[in-house]
Image (tube, rainbow, N blue to C red):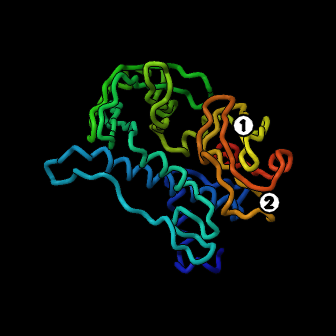
Amino acid sequence: MTHRQHQPMGNVYLVLLIERQMDLPKEDPSMRTLIYYTQINQAWSIKTETELYRRHRSILNPDGTGLTMGALYWQLNDVWQAPSWSSIEFSGRWKMLHFYSVKFFAPFIISPTLSLPSNNLTLTLVNDNLTNIDDVVLHVYIYRWNSMAPIKHLKKSYTVKKACSEIAWILPMTAEIKGYTLDEIFIRTTVTDSTEKPVTHDNFLFPTSLRRASKLMKPANVTIKSIRQLQSDQYEIHLKSDNIALFVWLELDLPRVDETLVYFSDNGFHMIAEDHIIKCTVPGVTPQELQHSIRIQVFNDHKS
């Protein structure tokens, strides 16, 4: 990997980018850990940038910026395993960014932003569909970094307009989090229908850097509770965590299996409840073999 880094200062730049927001673990300076942290940085950075463009779909600012709907990014074309900006690795495996792109390029998203110094939370809805989405409920959950129980849950009924972006809700966070500072909390947003069924992906807002947040978080132990076979090559994986777990990353370490045939329904996700279920497609393995071959990485399992 080091030999294939053709930018003379490439790894230095990667570390500098990471350390703007996070501390690399001193106890585990391995290449595997560095790759995991670069994936977090890449996925979260392009997510942030793309959501900015999508929020501006129906906005034209006085300086001429706006009226954007997204951006192209490097998905393919790696010629070998190497540090690169592509979202699909040379062997065909999805990097964390590719899992994130499914969410931030979904036809309908909720995108939270925090304005400073007013500390106002703005929820923008982006709907690329050609029909309105009626009778939805916007949810805002406020959590402390060290607890899975939200300290506050706010909701608002709304009808989403077709083919546009719009500001749906502005919340004064200083008033909503009395007794806490912005460094102590993070926010989860989602949209459901009237029966509480989600109609888009959850989205998260971290008001402080992950470096500061990591000092407040408890270490998370994420394990596989059970695996249930659904079809000959499809499995349901039941994960369990004892604390909030950020950027949970699963990899299959089974050399005899073609990596291009392995697919997780989600990856690099956040666990804010004890239980989380995902699906995995992989041919020619047993549930027992699968359980012993999945490696799990968690951001707040590392000690800086």
Residue 119 visible somewhere in the drawing:
no
Structural crowding at the residue carrying mark 2, measured as other residues with C-alpha within 10 Å and reported as few (<14), some (14–19) or many (≥20): some
Q: Is residue 275 left or right of residue 77?
A: right
Q: Residue furthest front?
A: 232
| Amino acid identity at mark 1 | Leu
Q: Is residue 225 left or right of residue 262?
A: right
Residue at position x 60%, y 56% in the image:
37
Alpha carbon distance from label 2 to label 1: 19 Å
Asked if 248 appears above or below 7 in the picture, the reply is above
Quadrant (top left/top right/bottom left/bottom right) for the N terminus: bottom right
Q: Is residue 221 left or right of residue 10?
A: right
Q: Residue furthest right?
A: 288
| Amino acid identity at mark 2 | Leu
Give x and y (percent) for residue 170.
31, 27
Q: Secondary structure at mark 2?
A: loop
Residue at position x 54%, y 44% in the image:
210
Asked if 177 appears above or below 90 in the picture, the reply is above
Give x and y (percent) for residue 63.
15, 53
Q: Is residue 245 left or right of residue 185?
A: right
Tag count in the figure?
A: 2
Q: Which residue is mark 2?
A: 254
Would you identify the image quadrant in which residue 70 lies?
bottom left
253 or 153, which is in the foreground? 253
Asked if 117 appears above or below 197 in the picture, the reply is below
Residue at position x 73%, y 36% in the image:
238
62 or 179, which is in the foreground? 62
180 or 14, which is in the foreground? 14
Give x and y (percent) for residue 185.
51, 30
Residue at position x 74%, y 38% in the image:
221
Q: Secondary structure at mark 1?
A: strand
Give x and y (percent) for residue 237.
72, 40
Q: Which mark is residue 239?
A: 1
